Image (spheres, rainbow, N blue to C red):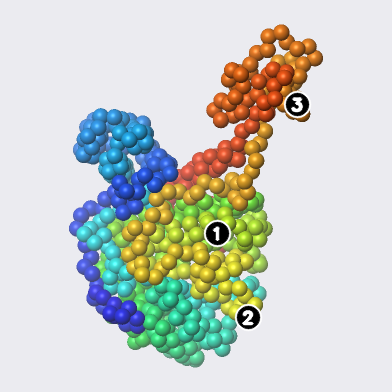
Amino acid sequence: GSCDSDGGGTERVTEKETMTNHDKPPVCILDRNLMNANTIGNMDNIGLSIFAPLCGKNRGVFVLNPPDGKTYGCSKFPATFAALAGVDSDAITDSNSIPIGVGAGSLSGSDAVDLIDLYVRSVYTSSAAVEDDPYGCDCGGLAVLECGANDNKRSLLGSTTPVRAATLAGMFVPAPWATGGYGTPPLTLEQARSFYTLDDFEDMVALGLNTVQIPVPVDVFAANADGLVRDAVSDLLELVKAAGLHTILVAVDDNDDDGNNITVDQQAADTAAAAAFAHERNVLALTLPASTPAIVRIARAAAPGLPLLLPTKGSELQNLNKSEYDGDDDIFAAVQMEHSTSVADVASSSSIEDRGKMTYHESMACIARSPIEYSACYRDVPVFVSNGFDLSIDDCIHQDEDRFQDFGQCGRFNETIDSGWWKRHRTSFAERQFSTFERGAGWSFAAWKLFGREENDVVGAIDSPAKLLSLRDVAAAGLIPSLTGTTTSTTNNLSCLNGPINDAAIGDETHPPSPAPPPDCGNGWWNSATSQCDYWIPPEDRVVPPAAVAGGGTLAGVGVASTSSGSSSAPPTQIGVSAMAGGAVAALVCMVVWRRFRGTSDQAYTMLR
């Protein structure tokens, strides 16, 4: 299919590319668009990026197919491993042989990539029940799950072009963080009508967006509704269309607002009315209030050919089954990829913990590609990330709400405002999410702008937690990659080639060396004022401390002074901060592996909301 030749308008595309995800069994391989002979030299640490996540799977073992009567792992490769990868080498005996060979120049980049690819395949084919594991092909974002000639690149826009949207948060469905904060009443209809103008939508187009996502209460479309909000939605759709943007309408079932649940029959009637409304106005897609087969059939009857999005959590993708929806090829998953919903996601009570949490989220952003590709290959349902694309790493937009739980995570936001460290890592976080979420049908950022801040606000000044969810602000702050003219940029986006920069321990500061324990002066003592050993009775034979080299100097990067009483050598030092940084890397890897093995839900952690 194709969009309008000029790329504008909101006409729904009816022609879809042929689904071919079952042309061959899904296979997990190295993503050579990311890691190849030209990019492998840019990797900071092949072992940390590839072998750390893979060596922990399957108890660390893999087997050959067909089996040869032996079991292998990171520490022992088959003697035929290089030959199986098409590489002429007899030095590949374990995983460490690959980076050693690359470093020594005895192994070419292309050969190393072939060997790593075979290792990725071997681990995946040795894994149990990968068809039920959305993270079965997880390799830190460097592996791709292939499942057909087109790898299920079905798009809402009728081609491989991803949806790039902003959500109009707070306009018709309450979102206090976007409209003044907790305690502020929801927008009146008059305020909602004035919230967005044609200029806003034209700014979205200029940035590179092609769609807006508009949440609307589903009961707005009910036959007995007064029609005022429905009319406002209709007028808004015309404004969006005039700017050349598409619309995804989100029918929100707000059952719990008054503590009462609407009946199944009422929900069905409202859904049918919403689907008919969306179909008549030719919107791009409709997100349903529920993902039950009954609701899908009701909406489909009212809106033939309209793409329907099923509200789904990332932890529920393995439960999707396209056959339950009568094999409908116009079914997509509207997935919540939220990253601030558990204690493990948000808790931190010091500056260094804040920064460590930031690097954790950067790493997790790359890992999120695995469930997106899993849904397309194994469930035959492409993923649209409807919620969860923003630059926050905590829940501080809710800190004034009664149910907020304070773990110390919101006390140091001012430290981030003018910080170069935070700007670099927020940019990295954005790039990684951008690269990951476009592996599916696309994404919608949390909001385009915040309500009521035009007069005194400085667009692009990230001076409150809510601004990290405002695309207009993070774009003005220079925190997101260019979206213009990059419809296929994800293919060559290298943001996940390496892990986050390992500087969480020092942040914006450059710390001086910290003193190490003084040398052993025997029966004397180290005089820090004179930088020498002093004695009441000088020994006849002064023994050089075991850590020192003859005549003073350094050993393993640690400065050591001579024990001669006349020595002027400086006291020994060690870079404590570097040691802390190295520990942070190890901790980060453990956290990622832990979250990977907890499965696809957050049940191992306390949920916040």
In contact (CB < 8 Å): disc 1 and disc 3? no
Asked where in the image residue 422 lies, by quadrant, the reply is bottom right
Q: Amino acid at mark 2?
A: Glu
Q: Secondary structure at mark 2?
A: loop
Q: Secondary structure at mark 3?
A: loop
- Estimate the spatial distance between the alpha carbons at disc 1 and disc 3, rounded to whole Å: 44 Å
In the rendered image, the residue lying farthest to the right is: 536
Residue that carries the numbered disc 3 in the rendered image: 530
Quarter of the figure that contains the C terminus: bottom right
- Estimate the spatial distance between the alpha carbons at disc 3 and disc 2, rounded to whole Å: 63 Å
Q: Amino acid at mark 1?
A: Lys
- Residue 428 seen in this snapshot: yes
Q: Residues within 10 Å of mark 1 (few under 14, many from 20)?
A: some
Residue shown at 27%/31% (left/top)?
Answer: 78
Q: Amino acid at mark 3?
A: Thr
Q: Residues within 10 Å of mark 3 (few under 14, many from 20)?
A: some
- All told, the count of numbered labels is 3
> Height in image: 207 above or below 129?
below
> Height in image: 346 above or below 103?
below
Residue 146: x and y in percent read 27, 55
Give 52 or 64, whichever is nearer the viewer: 52
Residue shown at 39%/42% (left/top)?
Answer: 46
Asked where in the image residue 483 lies, by quadrant, the reply is bottom left
> Height in image: 250 above or below 228?
above
Tell which circle, 1 or 3, labels the residue nearer the N-terminal end: 1
Instruction: Judge left or right: residue 120 versus residue 595.
Output: left
- Estimate the spatial distance between the alpha carbons at disc 2 and disc 1, rounded to whole Å: 25 Å
- Residue 77 seen in this snapshot: no
Asked where in the image residue 111 lies, by quadrant, the reply is top left
Q: Which numbered marker is on residue 455? A: 2
Q: Which numbered marker is on residue 423? A: 1
Residue 442: x and y in percent read 38, 67
